[in-house]
Image (cartoon, rainbow, N blue to C red):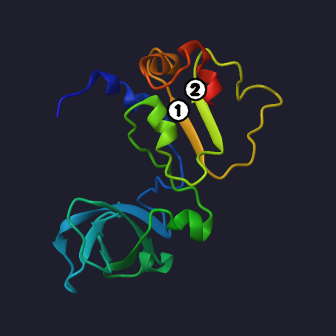
Amino acid sequence: FPMHPDLQFAGLLAPVDAPHHVRAEDHCRYREGVVLEKQSKDGGSLVNCGIPNRPVEIDRKLTAGIRCTVKIEPSLYGKAGPIKGTVVSPSAPREDNGMYWGYTTRLATSINDVFDSCPFEGGYDLKIGTSERGDKSVEEKNFRLPKYEHSLIVFGGVAGIEECVDADESIKLPGSQSKKLF
């Protein structure tokens, strides 16, 4: 596929060294993988979890091409033969082990929809809007995040969140006052 101009320098960026970006040689209890077309001898699916030449046999049959989170007993990595794993919820690493396992995104039709379509009862208890015109910075000496359960981070486009607010007719607030939303 052709090189997209927005990604032309992506290879120059430092790697994201996060727990859910597991290296091939790591013996991690959880891995993300993609279901392969080929099935195991038992009829379950095989998942490419980034372990060289060792697809993981999972406990069920899933549609080829989908992404899934797989739990693997770490002692199985060093043994000969197939690696067996269990498909788990994407939240299992966080809920079971307290591991950071990435974030979720959702598509909103407008800036107002970002708030109105919150999937959590009670909404977001921490809302952060990024803007070059903001008046708070993580670099401030006394900067602290409050305790929260559900956070939302909104990244504005090239013209910032302000332009998004100005373009949303359902928000009765000028873009210059968009910080009131956060």
Q: How many marks?
A: 2
Q: Nearer the viewer, residue 80 or 153?
A: 153
Determine the secondary structure under disc 2.
Answer: strand
Q: Which mark is residue 109?
A: none
In the foreground, 51 or 71: 71
Q: Position of residue 106 (x, y in %)?
A: 41, 44
Going 49% across and 75% down the picture, which residue do you hit? 74
In the displayed orientation, state which residue is furthest to the right.
142
Q: Relative to residue 79, is residue 42 drawn left or right? A: left
Q: Quadrant of the C terminus?
A: top right
Which residue matches tag 2? 130
Residue that numbered label 1 is attached to: 154
Residue 33: name its quadrant: bottom left
Q: What percent of the width, then of the height, locates residue 97? A: 60, 68
Q: Amino acid at mark 2?
A: Thr
Report crowding for label 2: few under 14, some 14 to 19, many 20 or more residues within 10 A (C-alpha): some
Residue 72, position as x, y percentages in the image: 44, 75
Relative to 155, does residue 125 appear above or below in the rendering?
Answer: below
Say what amino acid the circle numbered 1 marks: Val
Compared with residue 127, is residue 57 higher up or lower down, i.e. above or below?
below
Q: Nearer the viewer, residue 82 or 104?
A: 104
- Residue shown at the point (38%, 40%) measured from the top left: 107
Rendered residue at 78%/32% (across/down): 143
The residue at 20%/83% (across/down) is 43
| Callout 2 touching callout 1 (CB < 8 Å) | yes
Of marks 2 and 1, which one's residue comes earlier in the chain? 2
Residue 72, placed above or below residue 105: below
